[in-house]
Image: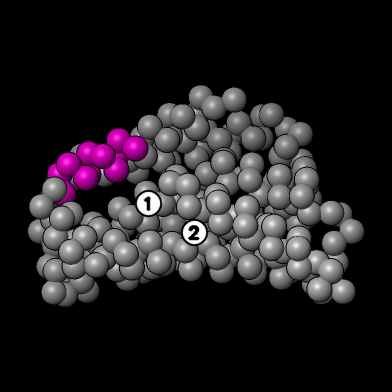
Amino acid sequence: MFFEYIPLIASIAFMLLLALVIPGPDFFMVVRQSLQYSRKTGIYTAIGLGLGIAVHITYCLAGIALIISKSILLFNIIKITGAIYLFYIGFQVFLSKADDIEIKNFEKKQDISSLMALKVGFLTNVLNPKATLFFMSMFTVFIPEVTPNIILAIISIVMILMTIIWFICVSLFFTQPKVQIVFNKFQKIFNKIFGGLLMALGVKIAVYE
């Protein structure tokens, strides 16, 4: 039974990979957390994103995704809430001051707690309406209703692990010493860029039809 569903699992994994590699709120948040704070914070943010994916999967499997897709009001509430959150985070980043980063020791500079990093990653993903649309389409269009529960569980685990692993790799790359040196040199500019991008994404999501 498992082998006949391998093409479906592979197709879903491929579509998720395409969604992951396209820069969006999740990507910019992990990059910002990694550069501004530390590798550890970037990794915990990535795990938070994975937990956010688990929420999307859970309500899709529970059938709530169908309700959301049919309710314009409910979807708009989710969309506006996510847009406000992204704009708020982006505004904070845009106004943040530059702090020198200790290249030789990522863990000793001022950092946020692991729980806070998890929370930021989790909220960024859960409140992203584009993620809502993606998973609704996956579970209502591409995955047949007759798909066995064990296969649904495998697909869910694959999606969560792919998200976490991908963004951990992003964090590892952006916390390389050479990348950190460049960021430290142009931190004010990067803060304006990342903050502006997050605010722009928030506005785009708010007006997106």
Residue closest to the eye, 108 or 142: 142
- Give how far across and how far down residue 71 sits, in percent: 73, 32
Q: Is residue 144 above or below residue 136?
A: below
The image position of residue 174, as x and y in percent, is 29, 61
The residue at the point 51 percent across, 24 percent down is: 207
Disc 1, SS? helix
Q: Residue 59: horizontal and vertical position, in percent?
A: 70, 53
Q: Distance between the residues labelled 1 and 2?
A: 10 Å
Which residue bears the numbered disc 1? 29
Magenta region: which residues? 187-197
* Residue 60 locus on image (x, y percent): 72, 52
- For badge 1, the amino acid type reads Met
Residue 126 appearing in the image: no
Residue 170 visible? The answer is: yes
Judged by its main secondary structure, the magenta piece is helix
The answer to which of 197 and 107 lies nearer the viewer is 197
- The residue located at (82%, 74%) in the rendering is 2
Which SS class for mark 2? Answer: helix
Q: Report if the CB atoms under discs 1 and 2 are less than 8 Å apart.
A: yes
